[in-house]
Image (cartoon, rainbow, N blue to C red):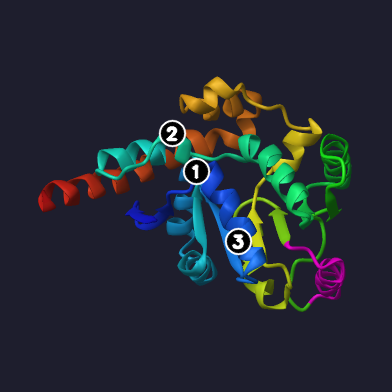
């Protein structure tokens, strides 16, 4: 079920319902896009004011990827729990096991060559029999570029059931919007730096920090140059949206 908050929506997937949704989409040949919904994504959605992002948000399912969204949802009276927050650190292994067991094919697009090749190797070793192919995310992304058309041809030749795109936000979202009608995968999911965690090229935050909403602090101290604006500036804009949501909720009560 989808719930409105922060000027957009989130879906109340938990781990089992998300895995079931992916498999059902493939079995019924229903095409679906699942994007990550966190505070940075919501900030980008509003501040970029991009017609492409808005068109994607209008059709995609939105997996909760941040405990603050769960907390705000609960404050608004929505039946969201910590189990509804699904990060790729916690999702990758169960998803790969499920698609392996179901005999589905996966294509991973994103990251640098060293990270994605090592990450895919780790997944193949861990989940024997997993059908997975990959390509790094560094290519000319323009829709009509020859290199982009070659990437799409490579993906379609593999005929994946699930396409995972990890090229960073909002680059991955724009790429999906531009190319979704040319891609043959039943399910497309955004994932940011997921394969880099698998490969170990980016260190994984302790899971207790994820469960308590402190994962951002770990990432900030690991890479302050990259994350200072995301975690120290962007939240102030989100707080304004949250205050508006709470005022509207009190007015309806």
Asked whether the beta carbons under mark 1 and mark 2 sit within 8 Å of each other, the answer is no
* Vertical placement of residue 196 versus 221, above or below: below
Q: Nearer the viewer, residue 248 or 122?
A: 122
Whether 212 is among the magenta residues is: no
Q: SS class of the residue under badge 3? A: helix
Among numbered discs 1 and 3, the one appearing first in the sequence: 1
* Vertical placement of residue 160 versus 131, above or below: below
Residue hosting label 1:
14
Among numbered discs 2 and 3, the one appearing first in the sequence: 3
* Of labels 1 and 2, the one closer to you: 1
Q: Position of residue 160 (x, y in %)?
A: 78, 63
Query: Which residue is painted at 66% across and 47% down in the image?
Result: 192
Q: Is residue 16 left or right of residue 178?
A: left
Residue hosting label 2:
82
Query: Which residue is painted at 34% across and 57% down in the image?
Result: 7
Where's the N terminus, which quadrant?
Answer: bottom left
Asked whether the beta carbons under mark 1 and mark 3 sit within 8 Å of each other, the answer is no
Q: CA distance from mark 2 to mark 3?
A: 24 Å
Residue hosting label 3:
24
Query: Which residue is painted at 84% across and 53% down in the image?
Result: 131
Q: Position of residue 163 (x, y in %)?
A: 72, 59
Query: Which residue is painted at 63% across and 25% down in the image?
Result: 205
Q: Position of residue 15 (x, y in %)?
A: 55, 42
> Within 10 angstroms of label 3, few (less than 14), some, or many (20 or more) residues?
few
Q: SS class of the residue under badge 2? A: helix
Magenta region: 145-161
Q: Position of residue 101 (x, y in %)?
A: 75, 48
């Amino acid at each position: 079920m989808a719930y409105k908050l922060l000027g957009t929506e989130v879906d109340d997937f938990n781990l089992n319902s998300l895995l079931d949704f992916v498999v059902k989409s493939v079995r019924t040949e229903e095409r679906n896009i699942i994007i990550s919904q966190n505070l940075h994504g919501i900030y980008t959605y509003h501040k970029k004011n991009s017609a492409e992002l808005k068109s994607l948000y209008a059709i995609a399912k939105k997996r909760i990827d941040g405990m603050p969204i769960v907390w705000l949802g609960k404050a608004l009276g929505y039946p969201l729990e910590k189990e509804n927050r699904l990060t790729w650190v916690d999702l990758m292994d169960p998803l790969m096991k499920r698609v392996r067991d179901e005999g589905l094919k996966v294509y991973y697009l994103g990251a640098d060559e060293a990270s994605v090749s090592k990450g895919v190797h780790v997944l193949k070793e861990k989940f024997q029999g997993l059908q997975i192919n990959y390509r790094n995310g560094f290519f000319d992304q323009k829709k009509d570029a020859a290199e982009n058309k070659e990437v799409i041809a490579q993906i379609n030749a593999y005929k994946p059931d699930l396409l995972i795109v990890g090229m960073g936000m909002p680059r991955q979202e724009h790429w999906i919007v531009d190319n979704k009608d040319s891609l043959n995968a039943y399910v497309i999911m955004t994932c940011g730096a997921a394969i880099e965690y698998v490969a170990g090229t980016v260190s994984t935050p302790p899971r207790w920090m994820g469960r308590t909403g402190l994962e951002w602090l770990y990432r900030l101290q690991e890479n302050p140059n990259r994350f200072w604006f995301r975690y120290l500036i962007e939240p102030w804009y989100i707080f304004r949206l949250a205050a508006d949501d709470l005022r509207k909720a009190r007015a309806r009560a």
